[in-house]
Image (cartoon, helix red, strand yellow):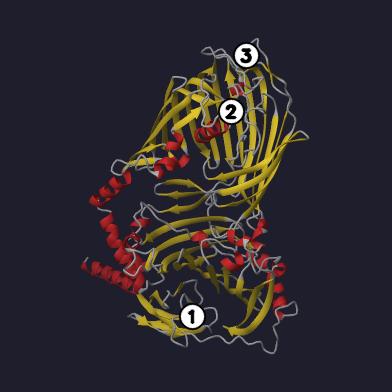
Amino acid sequence: MKARLLFLFFIAVAAQVSAQTYRLSGKIVDEKNVPVSFASIYIRNTTYGTTANEEGEYEFKLQAGTYTVVYRYVGYLEHTEKITLTSSNQERNITLMNEPFVLQGEAGTGNETDPAVDIMKKVIGKREYYLNQVNEYSCAVFVKGVQRLVSAPKSLMNKNVARALQLDASGKGILYQSESISEYNYKSPDHIKEVMIASKTAGQNTAFSYNKASDLQINFYQNNFEIQGLSARAFVSPFAENANSFYNYKLIGRSVKSGRQIDKIQVIPKRSNEAVYQGNVYVVEGDWRIYGVDLYLTNKDANINLVDTLNISQQYIPITDSVWLPTSSLFNFGGDVLGFKFKGYYLAVYNNYNLNPGFKKGYFDGEVMRIDTQANAKNMRYWNSNRPVPLTNVEEADYIKKDSLAKIQNTPRYLDSLNRAQNDFNPVSLSYLIFGHQFYDRKTRQSLYLNPFLQTVFYNTVEGYGIDAKVHYIKGFDNGQSFSVTPELRYGFAAKMLNANLGFTYNYDPKTQSVLSARFGSDILDLNNAGTRSLFFNTLSTLFYENNYVKLYRTRFGVVAWQRELVNGLLLNTQASYAEREQLYNTSFNHAFDNKEKTYTANNPLANPPTVESQLFPTNQALTIKASLTYTFRQQYITRPDGRYIEPSKYPKIRLNYRKGVSGILGSDVNYDFTSLDVFDDHMQVGLAGFSAFKITAGTFLNHRSLYFMDYNHFFGNQGTVFNPTIGSFHFLPFYAYSTDRSFLEAHYEHNFAGNFLSKIPFIRKLKLEEVVGANYLTQAQHSTYSGVGNNTLIQPVKGNYSEFYIGVQRFIFRVDYGISFDGGHKAIQGFRIFYGLR
């Protein structure tokens, strides 16, 4: 027995020794002893590699054995060493020599006769082959990001600012750094799933942090490449099928690496201020494939946002004899905001490629990313053992400093003091005026939100001056569930009318978007349920311009609703409500400026004449049932420890709606059936031309035996200078004139050219404006009467086709449009419409 145990012990020791890893490390410099930042190092005939850090330092964890290690970086001669690891760590410092790219008697001129033109034609000819060469693969991805402040204006940098940014006494230092390790899975043509194993950020006091490897997935074999946030435009690859229309090419020279001839080609934009790159590309002659790229964009030439320069470097290595894939991708950037100069980088290192992962059927189910519940809990020992790129001394010190600060900032005493400071309420502050105020208790995960003051005090001609006090109470739970209560009190002083209602919402299964809600009480509602003006803007237009556009009625109601995602991408919404609806009339005629040429209109949108009150509908009861099914094609989502988050879709959505007025139950007076179909997409990339948005809705009343004006189908109109830019809204359509109980078709289309034209105009291009054009259209089965008042029939004017066309410019949330509308063949309204964030 003892002999057997001893034998097993020796086997275990031998296995442990054979699995022992050793550290191969060193520093990579050039001929002038300057560190070669982000040089690539990989083991030949494997897919295991790493990248040097900013100071040229690198390290490997390897088992004992003999390895052929390749050191390379664009612009330097490839260096190969055979290294044997036996029983200890090794340090191997490397000097990379500048690479002499020789023209070999050929003259590059930068025009169509340059040899580079023929070379690039051959590479572009094989673009589609290499784009589709690999059907599927999996790999490990390490992503690292660093942002640092390099200088700041003395007038703006003080101790408080430096302390808030966690900088040193001089106001310089690392603002932010992050690391993540993921398993990345791909299947042609565009299926991805990323599983994040570990994530770390420097001193970020958040519940969770992550960095997606997919954000750094660059494939220059694709025609265009979008960089989110950098520009609304897509950038043309130097290897795109139409690249010859955008670039000139110049052969810089040739070199031989590992028996392959590499051509260095300068990429030169044919025209300035287009969405194109500058720099150099490296291609393998004979194979006509990408060897590496070293390209850049500038704010001056490419009109990019956020940064002044962005350098993109990428290096490919052979995974097999015929398949090459990236070993690293690097975004290097720098910029200047109000004198604060910053720079940084994001680096992705790819390892352990598997070209035959054998994904099971259904593996790519819409989940594009899953973050492990313990990803943010990995300790320093884990990171020291698993990060492929060593920290610099500055980065390591920053981690230690900010981790220490984070420990202090996560103590109950600090968190309680921070909670008290955030809950400090100032009723006369600008923040409360515009954004409202939130009280939050971190221990119980309860919050109370007060609506902004601008949404609390109002004026209209029905209620007079009034107060609409609404608060939102939310209780969150560790499993992602939440419960909310929303009470509302509304009082109009002129009408002496008090309304109160109470709402409940229970989000009981976040993974399936399952929500149960109910609301009951009394309220003042808009006759147009599609959308008109907010309380704030209606107050302004009524008081200062004597335009009381919004028409109101009173309801005493109860409503219950249920929502659930049946399968990924298919969302069901249902609702049942019972209401008593009462017509209201104008009771107040106060205004800020007495304009004797204008008179308030009646609270009946169909009144004739419009200034004289008349009955629109009798008091009635309505039992209404609603249901809708919304399908998102190929819906994608991210699963995080704190919930499931839907990603913006690349494809349109389709929604089927049904609404029924039920008669005879609980005294309900309505009897109708309405159905409609929506097809919409609010961001559809259109190559280099920018992006489009559209919405098409067709609907009809299957029967309309008994219904009232608020039961009609209404449209998202606009009356006033400020408009809502949401796709599906009109610029000039009156709020109530086109409401219908018959069949209709509405269509909206808008295209954002993303600065393609204005970026070419001197001075104007500095504003970085985006050009917008659009059109809205409405047609409906004609009807001429509205008989919702019993024996008193109101005349609803016959309406033909309605259309409007507009052009505009926007920058972030600011937008100005000029448009013109047509009622049938007659011009109706034209003018400017603006948007500046408030609706």
Q: Could you tell whether 88 is left or right of 103 in the image?
A: left
Residue 19 visible somewhere in the drawing: no
Q: Which mark is residue 528?
A: 2
Task: Indicate the quadrant where residue 204 lies.
Answer: bottom left
Residue 706 visible somewhere in the drawing: yes
* Residue pictured at 51% horizontal, 60% vertical: 215
Whole-number angstrom distance, CA of label 1 to CA of label 2: 68 Å
Q: Are marks 1 and 2 in contact (CB under 8 Å)?
A: no
Q: Could you tell whether 492 is left or right of 659 in the image?
A: left
Residue on which the image places disc 1: 71
Q: Residue furthest left?
A: 2
Judging depth in this view, the residue of 178 and 535 nearest the camera is 535
* Residue pictured at 64% horizontal, 20% vertical: 607
Judging depth in this view, the residue of 9 and 433 nearest the camera is 433
Q: Residue furthest right?
A: 825
Residue 462 point in image, percent of width and height: 52, 23
